[in-house]
Amino acid sequence: MDRISILGVQFDAITKAEAVQRAMEDIRKGNEGYIVTPNSEIVYMARNDIHLKKILNAASLVLPDGIGVIHAAKILKKPLVEKVAGIEFAEALIAQMAKEGRSLFLFGAKPGVAEKAAENLKKKYPGIIITGCRDGYFQNADIAVTEINEVGHSDVIFVCLGAPKQEIFMHTYMDELNGTLLCGLGGSLDVYAGVADRAPDFYVDHGLEWFYRLKKEPWRAKRMMALPKFLLTVMKSRVTGKEK
Ligand code: UDP
């Protein structure tokens, strides 16, 4: 399958539906791995961070989350098929898992959020088996891993600690965690639980989700400055051929 390099991060050029199919195949075959959904902020962070870049590129699927990455691919004349927002991929995956009675562990977010998300997801997708929940605030990662494993095997473990913490966690504990597929999904549990909302369709359809989020959470302005810097770096890389 084709991968497209943006500042050295190798994205899978596939649709959301294909990504779900690939993930389901891995689940059925028991192929262990993890899925990442980097946005422009994380790609920009990874350009000078070899360790983070390696972690991202070692994922079984690298999905382009956000319009910034799609723009970058166009600038580089290596268009990606479509944006695959982590949260949308995750929900499509749950729908498919529910049909097959597969199991899911929800790890991350503030205390109580994963439980609420589980409740909502079970209502919407009755076939899904939620093996357990654990909040994402822990002193000792080994203890968190032990607690996740106490429920037994999960086909999928959602790891929602924000980036790049969740990517580093998945890479570090992949072999210890008792799950086939790990998915790093940022703030998705907050949305499933109803404690944070997603931008209305108008913003999503017009590539303005970042603007909606900035209005709701103005303290993100500094983090969001990564987007123009990222696009400028991509333009430079097109001219120089250097991926930094
Ligand atoms: N979070 C966590 N543990 C931490 C830090 C953050 O579980 O040590 C959670 C936080 O509660 C939120 C998510 O990780 O649910 C990060 O959400 P955000 O939208 O900031 O992440 P992004 O998708 O932008 O990476």
Image (cartoon, helix red, strand yellow):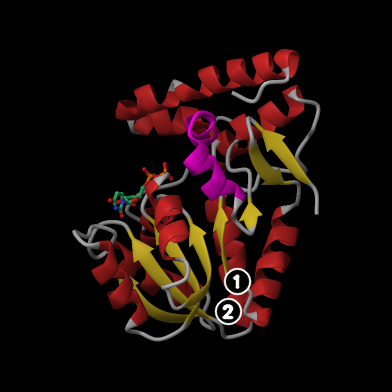
The residue indicated by pointer 1 is: 95
Q: Position of residue 145 (x, y in %)?
A: 32, 71
Kindly identify the residue that appears in the image at 60 percent across and 15 percent down.
Answer: 232
Q: Quadrant of residue 16?
A: bottom right
Q: Tell me which amino acid carries mark 1.
A: Ala
Using a 10 Å C-alpha cutoff, classify the residue at mark 2 as few (fewer than 14 neighbours), some (14 to 19) or many (20 or more): many
- At horizontal 45% and vertical 84% (from top left) the residue drawn is 153
Q: Quadrant of the N terminus?
A: bottom right
Q: Is residue 138 left or right of residue 109?
A: left
Reading the image, the residue beneath label 2 is 98
Residue 55 location in percent, x, y? Answer: 52, 49
Q: Kindly check if marks 2 and 1 are in contact, taking CB atoms under 8 A apart as contact.
A: yes
Q: Left or right of 135: which side holds 233? A: right
Q: Amino acid at mark 2?
A: Ala
Which residue extends farthest front?
A: 50
Depth order, front residue of 17/193 = 17
Range shown magenta: 42-57
Q: Is residue 157 magenta?
A: no
Q: Nearer the viewer, residue 216 or 91?
A: 91
Q: Depth check: 95 or 124 in front?
A: 95
Q: Residue at x 63, y 84 (%)?
A: 100
Q: Nearer the viewer, residue 203 or 79?
A: 79
Regarding mark 1 in the picture, which secondary structure is present there? Answer: helix
The answer to which image quadrant residue 43 occupies is top right
